Image (spheres, helix red, strand yellow):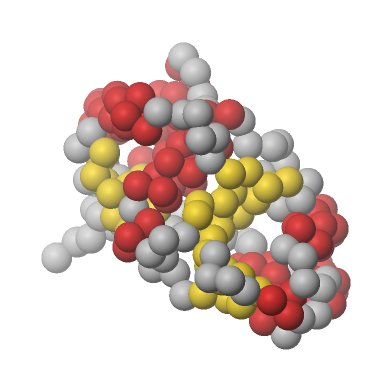
């Protein structure tokens, strides 16, 4: 039986959905059409896997920046400029964690949300636990441009809404890796308003996806 990832049922990862909500006008439709074509051809590759592993290793082994520096030389030459552009910001993010002797990696799980009839895969990159019991589920942003306000709000809200599956009682965090910037939810936001906004966006995404067939 085909899965959501391999058939042509409307489906989005959290990354693609949050990129979509940050677009306006005709750019939304062309973006969705591109995602559908990529699904049809089964194309797509994530070049950031080794960077995520290096970041986790620096946290686990309390070696701030050591593994990040080493991975730049370990990746294939074609990916080296990408890693050089990302590792300095990733090292700055490590500094925001404070004393690494008081931080531990935590296991996270993916969640599958259904928003406005659209399945959206919610997949943080790592989980953290701090001395005292505080926990975070962290999603990393690797794009050349900083995340827009819409992408930040959508990412944090989606993770928060499904935190019981991802990492119970954790706080959602979005990290702009290239700049080492950390984003957390604004307590002044109204979750019900965000739900209504994302439901409308998801319904439009699914309609554009079907229209592209």
Image height check: is 28 above or below 7? above
Q: Nearer the viewer, residue 117 or 133?
A: 133
| Residue sitting at the far front | 132
Using the rendered image of the protein, determine whether residue 39 is visible from the camera's viewpoint. no
The number of numbered discs placed on residues in the rendered structure image is: 0
Q: Is 156 positioned to the left or the right of 165 in the image?
A: right
- Measuring from the top left, give residue 125's x and y in whole percent: 54, 63
Query: In the rendered image, which quarter is residue 116 located in?
Result: top left
Residue at 41 percent across and 65 percent down: it is 167
| Residue sitting at the far top | 25
- Measuring from the top left, give residue 133's x and y in whole percent: 53, 70
State the quadrant of the C terminus.
top left
Q: Is 166 positioned to the left or the right of 139 in the image?
A: left
Query: In the rendered image, which quarter is residue 110 located in?
Result: bottom left
Q: Is 26 positioned to the left or the right of 85 in the image?
A: left
Q: Nearer the viewer, residue 155 or 190?
A: 190
Residue at 65 percent across and 50 percent down: it is 175
Residue at 34 percent across and 53 percent down: it is 162
Q: Nearer the viewer, residue 79 or 213?
A: 79
| Residue sitting at the far left | 1
- Measuring from the top left, give residue 135's x and y in whole percent: 53, 65
């Amino acid at each position: 039986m085909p899965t959501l990832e391999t058939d042509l049922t409307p489906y989005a990862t959290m990354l693609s959905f949050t990129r979509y909500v940050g677009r306006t006008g005709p750019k939304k439709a062309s973006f969705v059409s591109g995602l559908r074509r990529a699904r049809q051809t089964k194309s797509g590759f994530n070049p950031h896997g080794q960077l995520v592993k290096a970041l986790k290793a620096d946290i686990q082994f309390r070696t701030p920046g050591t593994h990040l520096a080493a991975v730049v030389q370990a990746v294939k030459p074609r990916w080296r400029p990408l890693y050089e552009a990302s590792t300095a910001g990733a090292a700055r993010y490590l500094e925001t964690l404070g004393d690494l002797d008081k931080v531990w990696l935590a296991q996270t799980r993916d969640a599958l949300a259904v928003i406005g009839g659209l399945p959206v895969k919610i997949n943080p990159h790592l989980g953290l636990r701090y001395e005292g019991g505080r926990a975070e589920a962290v999603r990393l942003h690797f794009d050349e441009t900083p995340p827009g306000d819409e992408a930040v709000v959508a990412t944090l809200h989606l993770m928060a809404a499904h935190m019981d599956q991802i990492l119970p009682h954790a706080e959602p965090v979005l990290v702009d890796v290239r700049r080492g910037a950390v984003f957390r939810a604004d307590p002044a936001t109204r979750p019900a308003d965000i739900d209504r906004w994302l439901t409308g966006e998801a319904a439009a995404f699914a309609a554009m996806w079907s229209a592209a067939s």
